[in-house]
Image (spheres, rainbow, N blue to C red):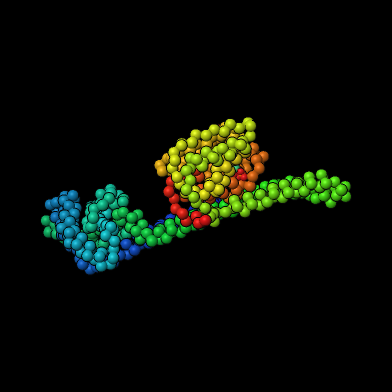
Amino acid sequence: MQIKSRFLIAGAIVALIALTTMQGYLTFNTYDLRKKEFAVESRTKIGSIVNQPHIDSLSWDFRNAFARKIPDYKNGLISKEELLQVLSDSAQLKNTEFKQYFNEAAKQVGLNENVLYKKFASSIVLIDSKGHPEVILDKRANTPIFLLGENFITETGLQINGWNWTFDQPVVYENGDTESIVIKFSSSIYMKIIDWDKIIFKQLLLLFFIAFLLFVFTITLVAYSIRNLLKLKRISEIKTDFINNITHELKTPLATLSIATKTLTNKFAKDNTDISQESIETINRQNKRLQNLIDQVVDTSLGYNDIELNLEPVVISEFINELCDDFSLTVPNHVQFLRSIDPTKVTSEIDTFYLGTAIINILNNAVKFDGTVLKVTYNLIDDKHTIAISDNGIGISKKNKKLIFDKFYRVSEKNTHNYKGLGLGLYYCSQIIKAHHGILDVESKVNEGSTFYIKIPIEHGKENSISR
Ligand code: ADP
């Protein structure tokens, strides 16, 4: 059972880790895929905007302005830098109009506002009539001329595409010669997505949320199942222990009864009244012992709701004193029994039989678990009758402190298996005290001793009481 449940728990945890890893991987993949999809969507939308004739005409405007200045350049009236400046200036003149138009069109096609657009001229080459090229803007020099959109750092964006135009420009030289110059103009388009992660995250929020809920649900389910499994395992162990204990407790009286009845049926005993009398007494004693054992199991398994209290007003200090008087008569010689009872005369309604049983039970345990110095203290603290029963016995470990009030629970450490019992006493005590609306608590240290605290409010309800 132990190996099996350990195996099951380990299996469940491994499966959970595998499932979580897989879910994480799938979620990451979905995220990555959505990112790519978003880039493709944005690219297509930008394409649909910049292909519109109006945008095309804007591009032609600054390209024509540039082309018209080529004759001046060829005649030496302006430098190459000035020629390129013309291109840059005329593009900037158009950029405000472009951005306005772009933003409106972007709204129409549903392009996310975080997607930026940039167009720049990457290379310009002039080819004269003899076919000699002259590089005006060198692609390799990496000094592109910004044309339209937002001037973000190109490396932070994604390339959408590149355009090549070829067009002719007639040039008239000062000496009257004319020539047709072919302009090879290349430009590139880039886009940049700002807060790209946030956009995708927002889009996948519902998916993440559902994945998270499923994750929490699975973890809870596994944790709950493991807890249940452990609980069942503990209950099964406790029950086995209980059966072993009660069998052990029953063995002695049954064996004695068997011997006594054999003696009685013996022919020799029939004629001997002394032997018969002795056997009958043994049978009675063992019968009583068996009865006590059964009563203990039946009574002490009652829950606090089943306990019907017969409440009567009692001066608690006097009640404790009387109880201690009675108990002191049964204390073994090697045990020192001390008490410190506050003589206050506060009266509360209690069931003397049940509360007495609970206190005696705790005192008996103190002796049973090797207490040699026992002390009962009674005080009124915060409107509560507080009875502390301390001993210097074997003590209880922190782990077991939480469990000893459970039904059938017995500490099963190797060194404690010699102490007889059914594990019902403290459960019964806690139920009696609960029926009095009080609490039973323990403070303990292994090998140093334990103190059990009973705290009962001065006034408490009477739901559990019966009228006599
Ligand atoms: P039982 O005494 O029949 O085993 P109880 O319910 O009275 O059952 O006690 C439960 C367990 O609590 C005991 O098995 C014992 O390990 C522990 N226990 C109770 N009282 C003491 C005590 N005074 N000192 C040390 N251990 C105690």
Considering every residue shown, the one lying at the far right of the view is: 267
72 with respect to 161 (left or right): left
Residue 334 visible in the displayed image: yes
Q: In screen coordinates, is 302 left or right of 271? A: left
Does residue 264 sit above or below 398 in this rendering?
A: below
- 449 or 323, nearer to the observer: 323
Judge by depth and name the residue closer to the eye, 310 or 209.
310
Q: Is 455 rendered above or below residue 231?
A: above
For the point 53% across and 47% down, the residue is 352
Q: Nearer the viewer, residue 133 or 360?
A: 360
Please give the name of the residue rendered at 48% of the width and 46% of the height, measured from the top-left corner. 314
Question: Picture coordinates of residue 464 (x, y %)?
Answer: 49, 55
Query: Do we see residue 222 in this rendering?
Result: no
User: What residue is rendered at 19% in x and 58% in y?
Assistant: 95
Label tally: 0
Q: Quadrant of ligand 1?
A: top right
Percent position (x, y) of residue 445? 54, 35
Q: Is 462 left, or right, of 204 in this rendering?
A: right
Position in image of residue 84 (x %, y %): 19, 53
The percent coordinates of residue 328 (x first, y second) are 59, 36
Picture quadrant of residue 35 = bottom left
x 49%, y 34%: residue: 340
Picture quadrant where residue 229 is located: bottom right
